[in-house]
């Protein structure tokens, strides 16, 4: 990111956040396809690991931004992983799509795992997955 430009004070709005098995951007059309959207995981035993993709769509952004997507174990509040990056939005009326590919994420136990979205240090919202043991 160009260090000469300050970070924007305009707070974007998170209009979509989904967890899926695979997300891919078509190089020809620029469209993002999401396969296997889910919010529940059943595992044979804990601890476990699972790769996931996270898609987020923002609007009302204008200017330079740094973003974080924190993967948080809700029962402990511990951040287990995070993705970071930056983007520039030239038009507040447009949208920004974030297509995040996570390596296998830890699932230390049963419960809720949040994907929290932050831009320029401001919390925008979150999505989640719930993990449980197979019966």
Image (cartoon, grey):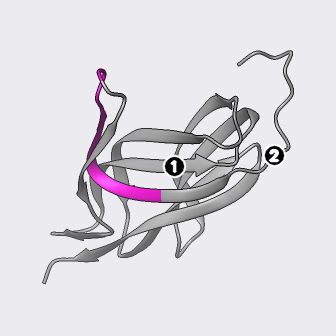
Location of residue 34 with respect to 132 vertically, above or below: above
Query: The N terminus is located in which quarter?
Result: top right
In x, y percent, where is residue 38? Answer: 28, 64
- Span highlighted in magenta in the image: 17-28
Q: Any magenta on residue 19? A: yes
Secondary structure of residue under mark 1: strand
- Identify the residue position indicated by label 2 in the image: 10
Circle on res. 88: none
| Residues packed near mark 2 inside 10 Å, few (<14), some (14 to 19) or many (20 plus) | some
Look at the magenta stretch and give its main secondary structure.
strand
Q: Residue at x 34, y 35 (%)?
A: 31
In x, y percent, where is residue 83? Answer: 53, 40
Q: In the rendered image, which quarter is residue 116 located in? A: bottom right
Left or right of 135 on screen, residue 101: right
Q: Any magenta on residue 16? A: no
Secondary structure of residue under mark 2: loop
Location of residue 19 with respect to 27 vertically, above or below: below
Marks 2 and 1, how far apart at CA: 16 Å
In x, y percent, where is residue 112? Answer: 43, 73
- Identify the residue position indicated by label 1 in the image: 57
Q: Residue at x 55, y 59 (%)?
A: 15
Left or right of 83 on screen, residue 107: left
Which of the pair 7/44 is nearer the observer? 7
Q: In the rendered image, which quarter is residue 45 located in? A: bottom left
Q: In the rendered image, which quarter is residue 3 located in? A: top right
- Looking at this rendering, what residue extends furthest in the bottom direction? 135
In x, y percent, where is residue 14? Answer: 60, 57
Sequence-wise first label, 2 or 1: 2
Which of the pair 98/52 is nearer the observer? 98
């Amino acid at each position: 990111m160009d260090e000469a430009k300050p970070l924007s004070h305009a707070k974007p709005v998170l209009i979509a956040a989904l967890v899926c098995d695979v997300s891919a951007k078509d190089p020809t059309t620029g469209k993002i396809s999401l396969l296997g959207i889910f919010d529940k995981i059943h595992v044979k035993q804990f601890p476990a690991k699972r790769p996931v993709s996270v898609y987020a769509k923002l609007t009302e952004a204008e200017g330079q931004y740094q973003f974080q997507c924190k993967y948080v174990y809700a029962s402990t509040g511990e951040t287990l992983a995070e993705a970071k990056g930056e983007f520039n939005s030239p038009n507040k009326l447009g949208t920004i799509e974030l297509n995040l590919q996570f390596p296998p994420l830890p699932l230390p136990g049963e419960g809720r795992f949040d994907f929290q979205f932050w831009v320029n240090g401001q919390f925008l919202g979150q999505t989640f997955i719930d993990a449980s043991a197979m019966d």
